[in-house]
Image (cartoon, rainbow, N blue to C red):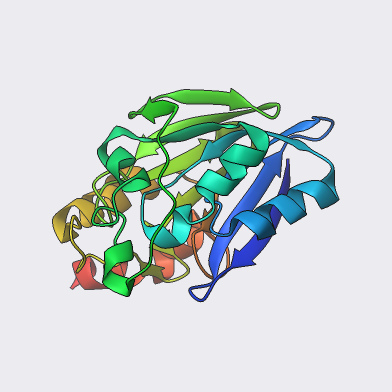
Amino acid sequence: MQIITVVCGALATNTYIVYEDGSQDCVIIDPADGAAALNALKECGKTCTHILLTHGHFDHIYGVAEVKRATNAEICIHEEDAAALHSGRANLALLIRERIEPTHADRLLKEGDVIEAAGLKFRVIHTPGHTAGGVLYAVDEHRAAFCGDTVFYESVGRTDLPGSSTRDLIDSFFNKVLPLTGYRLYPGHEEETTVAHEAQHNPLIAYYRR
């Protein structure tokens, strides 16, 4: 599996271009900047067939409409976050007085769905907490998961935003993330990490051991 990381915008959001070795197709995960994502797509010479969204916050969906227009890729987002694609209130763009070009999902996801694309199978794991419709995309054959803002390197996503839930995030971390033994995690911001590392060093672990 090949992973190209494009760091986008003022919040340094990770946009991922992912494909299996030998595949002409790819997926783009969280296109935070349309021009940057399309430039990276051109450089790698792949055809984007799917836009996979980990959640609906503005810094992860800013470039969705532009990428959709250029590629006609299938937009996939969990059903609980679908409104964020066309609502500045839901995607929090109103908080920064920005406007996100509205669009709509082609496929509404739920727990356990599998997206077959770019020679890979992306298994949808619903991880509410940071948003109601946050998901991980697990590529089980490569023991990798794209986790958005659910978990970061020695940190977790914020739960002080509209639609967030601390209780749900804790449940997602312990019951959805930690069971992915041996997986590498590709978060929405900052550096990659592993489940093994987070099981030892994430502050939630230390807090709940007290």
Asked if residue 91 shows in the view, the reply is yes
- Viewed as shown, does residue 118 lie left or right of 199? right
Q: Residue at x 52, y 25 (%)?
A: 115
Task: Provide residue 12's location: percent of width, then percent of height.
Answer: 54, 72
Q: Quadrant of the C terminus?
A: bottom left
Q: Quadrant of residue 93?
A: bottom left
158 over 45 or under it: above or below: below
Task: Provide residue 13's location: percent of width, then percent of height.
Answer: 52, 65
- Viewed as shown, does residue 32 lie left or right of 54? right
Question: What is the tally of numbered marks visible in this picture?
Answer: 0
Q: Residue at x 24, y 55 (%)?
A: 169
Q: Quadrant of residue 51?
A: top right
- Viewed as shown, does residue 25 lie left or right of 190? right
Question: Which is more toward the observer, 147 or 50?
Answer: 50
Asked if residue 183 shows in the view, the reply is no
142 over 6 or under it: above or below: above
Q: Residue at x 75, y 47 (%)?
A: 41
Question: Which is more toward the observer, 122 or 200?
Answer: 122
Task: Provide residue 195's location: percent of width, then percent of height.
Answer: 47, 55
Q: Quadrant of the N terminus?
A: top right
Task: Provide residue 133's location: percent of width, then percent of height.
Answer: 29, 43
